[in-house]
Structures are given as structure tokens and as C-alpha cells.
Image (cartoon, rainbow, N blue to C red):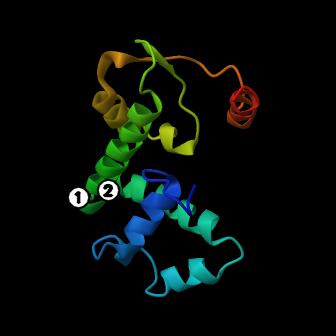
Amino acid sequence: GALLGDEGSAFWIGREALKDPQLRRLWPADMAIRVGRGENPIRATAALAKTVLARAAHGDKAAVALRRRAARELAALVQEAAKGLATPVPLSLHGSLFKDEALRREMLADLGRRFSLVAATLAPEDAAATVAGHS
């Protein structure tokens, strides 16, 4: 989660955008203070990812670079989680970030052929609870 990592997530993209001199210009100068003092700073920061991905789709170089970094981070997370699993590893993508076709395509390209996309049969929280119950 956001407190211990979450590289590549919407929160991570929003946080990185607020630190990037080229991207933070997309919002008012006090945006970092606004999200930090808001009711839900993690959700507010994550919401900034939508703007970054939209800018990337229109060719903003800084946004494209950040989207690329996010795709690499997500692929690394998947690779780490799949260590020791037989190939092909079934992979189901969930979350609003994967609605962004470019980010999805970049992440899948980073993963290579070891993974096979499958449709989700459970909600993510149900799948996590099932796995946790078997540990």
C-alpha cells in the first residue's frame, strides 16, 4: 500500500507528479498542501494520476516518462509476485490504471511471454481473502 511502497500505483503516479517540476505545473502551486491536508490524502493524490495519464495520451513528454516508469514498476511487482510459479502464470488485471491502454500495453510488454492474461473470477478483495485463508 501507499505507506510501504505501492510503486506504479495511482497514488505513486500522483505523488511523483507532484514532485516533478514539469508535471506539478498541471495543478495550482498549493496542490500538494491541498491533498496532504485533505480528508483522504492518499485518495486525493491517487486521483491526480488521471490527469497525468490524460496528458501522456496527448504526448506530454514528462507524463509519458512517468507512465513508462509506472509500467516498469508494476511489471517488477508482478515479476516478484510470480517467482517460483510455473509458466504461463495466469494474470488478471484489475483497477482503473489498466483502463489506460498505453500503460497496460507497456506493462505487458515488460512482462514478456511468461504471463497469460485471464479474466478475473473473483473481486480482488475476495481473492486476497481466499489466499490469506490458505496461508
With 99 as the anchor, is 101 left or right in this view?
A: left
Image x and y of residue 14, in percent: 46, 64
**Residue 71 against residue 32 in the figure, above or below:** above
Task: Specify few, some or many for label 2: CA neighbours under 10 Å numbering under 14, 14-19, or 20 or more.
Answer: many
| Residue 127 quadrant | top right
Residue at x-position 41% and y-position 73%: 18
Image x and y of residue 41, in percent: 62, 72
| Residue 114 quadrant | top left
Q: Quadrant of the C terminus?
A: top right
With 75 as the anchor, is 35 left or right in this view?
A: right
* Tag 1 secondary structure: helix
Kind of residue at disc 2: Leu
Residue at x-position 45% and y-position 41%: 100
**Residue 58 visible in the picture:** no
Circle 2 or circle 1, nearest the eye: 2
**Residue 26 against residue 67 in the figure, above or below:** below
Residue 66 is marked as 2
Residue 61 is marked as 1
Q: Quadrant of the N terminus?
A: bottom right
* Tag 2 secondary structure: helix
**Residue 124 against residue 12 in the figure, above or below:** above
Kind of residue at disc 1: Lys
Residue 86 is marked as none
**Residue 109 against residue 33 in the figure, above or below:** above
Image x and y of residue 83, in percent: 41, 27
